[in-house]
Amino acid sequence: MEKLKFQSPTGMHDILPEDQKYFQKISKTCEEFADFYGFQPITTPILEESGLFEKGTGELTDIIQKEIYSFKTKGGDSLALRPEGTPPVVRAYLEHGMQSLPQPVRLSYFGPFFRHDRPQAGRYRQFHHFGMEAIGEGSALIDAQIVQIFYNILTSLKLKKLVVEVNSIGDGQCRSSYKRALNKYLRLKTSSLCPDCKKRLKDNPLRILDCKNEKCKEAALEAPQTVDYLCENCHSHFKRFLEFLDEIGIPYTLNPRLVRGLDYYTKTVFEIYEESEEGKSQGTLAAGGRYDNLVKLLGGKKDTPACGGAMGVERIINMMKAQGAEMPQPVLPKIFLAQLGELSKRKSLKLLDDFRKAKIKVAESLGRDSLKPQLKIANKIQARYSLILGQKEALAGEIIIRDMDSRVQKIVKLDKAVEEMKEMLKKQQS
């Protein structure tokens, strides 16, 4: 096929009509769960100040160093397309004085995000996330509930073989001692590390545990485990988190090398993916954790405990398709409106609006002038009734109702057509 002059940018994609039903299904499911658990919807701008992510997500993360879309405006502002949802939600929490509301403040969002990542299956440069943030609550109960909600959303979407991996990366008090131990271990493995991880070794050794390079994974196999370096407070928090997961029956696996790729995480981190014969199939479906320092880091007056997570919509859709998930089929109209002549077209516009107000779906092809191709469409969509409005009927203020099965037809007043069809549909259903 000849290449078109304009195509969607690399790594970005059109959401075609046949995929909209998946987005709608996921969006509706997420909305129902969020509403039940008291997470109120919030929509933040697609563009934010670049500094929000440099400060919040972390200057040394791959997102900031390699993936963020940032630019200077004509007015000299430094802006970025949002690569993730947590810093914008925390910024909104602070900007709109939500600290004065009863805590925790529970917020949810659904929308597009952007990262200049390497396009591959399930990974795009423009993608959609559903996320939840609970700000102002330090209990491990919230951590477990966040995991529970994401797990139940995925199971309600009929995804199978879900694996929940959990870990604790401690807080500022105990993480420094872990970093020293990790650094000491990894220095003996320097020759096996990729160029990026050699740079990370000095300033950000935890990111090495998150590296996807096979040699780096192998080098980190026997690295010290974060759980062995937790202070008493972090250890107690993690223990309670696991007890809550046990209580609510969420199956989980302890992954002592799970750290997540964002700098603001403290204590609990988690990932949910679908297991395949090769391991992780198309990557993580949902992930998140606790971020008790982010509110203060972004300008809050004090440390504010918080926990949240997000899930990748496109990856979930790919999984649903791969499993042959049954999607609700669109309800085809049982009525088709056919017309002939200019006056009939004008009358049809008013009639269609009357059917809309009565919440009765009607198909039409107003651009066609011949009756035969219009009735062919009525047959194709298996409409039970055809309304035929010709020039003669339009002048007389009448319309023909034809039963497409029996071919029996009758003439009714045009202004009574909606009520007549309502009664006929009711009889057909009974």
Image (tube, rainbow, N blue to C red):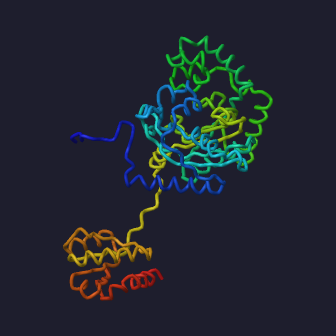
Of residue 194 and residue 59, the one placed in the foreground of this image is: 59
Q: Does 224 appear above or below 391?
A: above
Q: Quadrant of residue 7?
A: top left
Q: Position of residue 64 (x, y in %)?
A: 51, 28
Asked whether, in this view, residue 100 is left or right of residue 367, the answer is right
Q: Residue at point 51% right, 53% down?
A: 26
Q: Is residue 291 above or below residue 128?
A: above
Q: Examine the rendered structure and indicate whether residue 352 appears above or below residue 178.
A: below
- Residue 366 visible to an observer of this rendering: yes
- Please tell me which residue lies in front, 325 or 269: 269
Q: Is residue 77 left or right of residue 354?
A: right
Q: Residue at x 70, y 33 (%)?
A: 267
Foreground pick, 106 / 386? 106
Quadrant for the N terminus in the image:
top left
- Whether residue 116 is visible to the viewer of this picture, yes or no, is no
**Residue 242 in the image: x percent, y percent?**
73, 39
In the picture, measured across the screen, residue 33 lies left or right of residue 424, that is: right
Question: 410 above or below 270?
Answer: below
Q: x, y percentage for residue 250?
A: 67, 45
